[in-house]
Amino acid sequence: MSYEEKNLDDARTLTETDSPKQNSLSEIFRFALIALIIVLPIRWYIAQPFIVSGASMEETFHNNEYLIVDQVTYRFDEPERGDVIIFKYPRDHSKYFIKRIIGLPGETVVIDGSSVTIKNDENPDGMILDESYAALGSARFDQTVTLGDGEYFVMGDNRDHSSDSRSWGVLKREEIVGRALLRLLPPGRADLMPGSVDKSS
């Protein structure tokens, strides 16, 4: 075999060897691109992960539990009393909190010790909330807040250990990210609509 023929064979072998690798890299890139196109819109507009930090929602939620947040429902429906929501902390939008909605726009929230009374058009004399989900604790709060349009009053279920509307004020509608849809971790506590309450009563 001549020198030229040998070099030609070497070049052919190199080309045949590299071609599958190039195809493989191309497929990986294409798959990654498709995954990004599918995943990113879901992450930004439909659902996103959230990790619980702190004890403010115990015993309903514990530290380091992994949640999926529903970001779609509130585009079509208004938040309701009892919903567990994730929102941007009003004093620092780089932080996210998880709390429960207690008061709705137009209502007056009256806190007397550990008792919460809601006054609205349907209950002008007030209705005392049944908060079987909450650890009311021993701390006393005496406060009356009337909510305007697009304003919500939120509180943590663990009342003695929660920074919420009692201390930093009302929550604006535009600061709400979404509601707790799934609890994925830990596996033993996985469930759908964690923390939900019966709203029929």
Image (cartoon, helix red, strand yellow):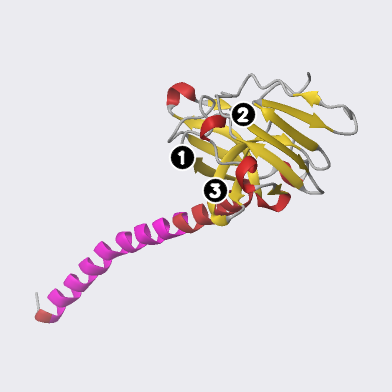
Q: Is residue 107 left or right of residue 164?
A: right
Above or below, 70 relative to 35: above
Residue 86 visible within the image: no
The location of residue 157, given as percent across then percent down, is: 58, 29
Label 3: few (<14), some or many (≥20) within 10 Å?
some
The location of residue 151, given as percent across then percent down, is: 75, 47
Q: Which residue is mark 3?
A: 96
Q: Which residue is mark 2?
A: 193
Rendered image quadrant of residue 164 = top right
Name the amino acid, label 1: Ser
Residue 53 is marked as 1
Marks 3 and 2 sit apart, C-alpha to C-alpha, by: 19 Å
Predominant SS of the magenta segment? helix
Quarter of the rendering occupied by the N terminus: bottom left
Name the amino acid, label 2: Met
Q: Would residue 28 be counted in the magenta stretch? A: yes
Q: Is residue 16 left or right of residue 172?
A: left
Badges 3 and 1: C-beta atoms under 8 Å apart?
no
Span colored in magenta: 4-31
Q: Nearer the viewer, mark 1 or mark 2?
A: 1
Q: Which element carries disc 2, helix, strand or loop?
A: loop
Q: Earlier in the sequence, mark 3 or mark 1?
A: 1
Residue at the image point whose x is 86% and y is 33% from the top: 120
